[in-house]
Image (cartoon, grey):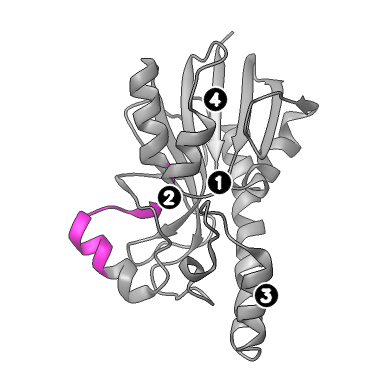
Amino acid sequence: MRTWLVVAAEAREFDGILRRCGTSSPLDWPGARFARQASWKGDHWLFLANGPGRGLVEEVLSSKPRQVDIMMSTGYCGALQPGQRVGDIVVSGEMPVSSPIPFVRGEIASLDRVAATATEKRALGLETGAVAVEMEAAAVARKAKEWGVPFCCVRVVSDTAEEDMPLDFNRYRDKEGRFSIARIMLGALARPFTAIPGLMRLDKSCRVAAERLGEFFADSTF
């Protein structure tokens, strides 16, 4: 039995996965905002979320308190190439993955900020050749290398290369780097006819993406 440590930014990114795990239980992991564990597919799975970005990953993975055989970064990502759609799966890393669900294997850019506009995403795609962008994978990969365990990244598109975010979420992070829901709502209220419908569309896309990610985990062999 292998022990997987799977790291995301937010608990909701695990919704589709945890629904398919059956029974999961609380996990005692120092400093984590969200931590669950499950026995699934013959392995032991640890799921952690502590917020977006490099610093919060490094904080929650500051020590290795238990046996971990494989580390994975997962959750939402922004598409960087034309034609990608919400719910598309992107895989990065050398670990073999077999799945009946189509996926793209390619580089994933890891920033410590949100790529908030279509212009920024297009430029990043051209500059790096990456197929997607997210905020935590590089930090998880560095920790996996430090601990001497294999690493892979499995992400699901929540926003396409052609669309802007409804708000520049970088403006609404607190001093620790987490997104402030209260400040986001105040920002949306200042632009009620554009930001509020945009946030509702993004929320729907995130729910679709989380469900698709759960399907991929359930149907795939890693």
The reply to whether the C-beta atoms of the residues labelled 3 and 4 are less than 8 Å apart is: no
Task: Give the residue number, with chain letter if any, for mark 4.
Answer: 5
Mark 3 / mark 4, whichever is N-terminal: 4
- Secondary element under disc 2, as helix, strand or loop, is loop
Tag 1: residue type? Ala
Mark 1 / mark 3, whichever is N-terminal: 1
Task: Give the residue number, with chain letter if any, for mark 3.
Answer: 185
Mark 4 / mark 2, whichever is N-terminal: 4
* Label 2 to label 1: alpha-carbon separation: 8 Å
The reply to whether the C-beta atoms of the residues labelled 2 and 1 are less than 8 Å apart is: yes
Q: Position of residue 172 (x, y in %)?
A: 54, 68
Mark 4 burial class by Cα count in 10 Å: few <14, some 14-19, many 20+: many
Drawn side of residue 107 relative to residue 75, left or right:
left
Residue drawn at (41%, 61%) of the image: 84
Task: Give the residue number, with chain letter if any, for mark 2.
Answer: 135
Q: Which residues are magenta?
A: 123-136
Tag 3: residue type? Met
Residue 83 figure quarter: bottom left
Drawn side of residue 25 relative to residue 214, left or right:
right
